[in-house]
Image (spheres, helix red, strand yellow):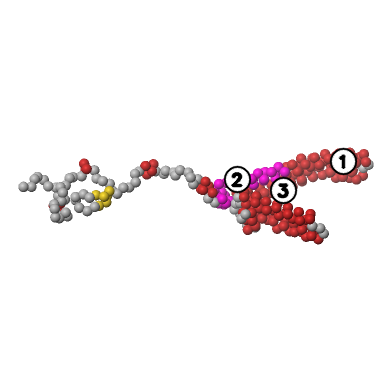
Amino acid sequence: MRLMFEPLRKYFDFQGRARRAEYWQFWLANFILFFVLDIMSMAASGGGKSMIGILKILLVLGLAIPNLAVAVRRLHDTNRTGWWIILPTATLLITLMMFIGVQGAAYIQMLEGVSQSSDYEWRSQLAEAGAFLGTLFLWVILPTCVASLVIFIFHVLPGTEGPNRFGDDPKGGAADIARVFDAPEETDARAAHAEPHKPVFDFGPARGVPSVREAAPSPASQPRYPPAPTGNPLAPGAIRPTFGKRR
């Protein structure tokens, strides 16, 4: 529900990005609001209906900017410029100007003929009006609907993952959460297969007290010393090898 009213908090914010949930929830809130007002307008009469009509006009004007802003941010989320939002309006204006330039004179003549013709001629002019409306649909209405469909598809498409040229991903760390159960990457194969450190406690005869060293010495690489003499384990004679047999 927080995303439904997020466009109101970012009333004049045309920067950054908006996720699909923010755009469509706000659109749904607009639909529900005006649907309720329409029902109230049908149930009301007299001054109440007029007040509801005025309220609807004020809401349309007041919600126009946040609707436009969230639509622009939704386009930014798909890594498209917000100028795409004017595509339907620009298509309508351009095609309408082209239609008037080509068919405007014929349309004016048709209206003058309908007002001054007899019943038979009026039916003929009505058929011409039908052909005229068909041409209007092909020239103006159909291209505008196609342009509106393009913008609708842009708003439906998912946003780009991670940051793009319009800002950070509004979903935040959702992509990292999706990979939380992936296997960890091994940056160093030797480090991944190395045995853990195991300290060795040495109770050798050289000192007579336990000591800790990194690894046990190899028997072949170390000289053998006789046991320390009884009485003074730290005497200098305790660490010297004895050659020969004492008599």
Is the residue marked by circle 3 packed among few (<14), some (14-19), or many (20+) residues within 10 Å? few
Of 92 and 39, nearer the camera is 39
Q: Secondary structure at mark 3?
A: helix
Query: Is 18 displayed left or right of 55 in the figure?
Result: left
Q: Which residue is mark 3?
A: 89
Identify the mark nearer the N-term, 1 or 3.
3
Q: Is residue 160 magenta?
A: yes
Residue 207, position as x, y percentages in the image:
20, 53
Of 246 and 133, nearer the camera is 246
What is the span of residues highlighted in magenta in the rendered image?
Answer: 145-171
Residue 68 seen anywhere in this rendered image of the structure: no
Can you say which quadrant of the picture contains the N terminus?
A: bottom right
Q: Which residue is mark 1?
A: 126
Q: Which residue is mark 2?
A: 158
Amino acid carrying label 3: it is Thr
The residue at 31%/47% (across/down) is: 198
Residue 33 vertical position relative to residue 106 in the rendered view, above or below: below
Residue 201, position as x, y percentages in the image:
26, 50
Q: Is label 2 or label 3 in front?
A: 2
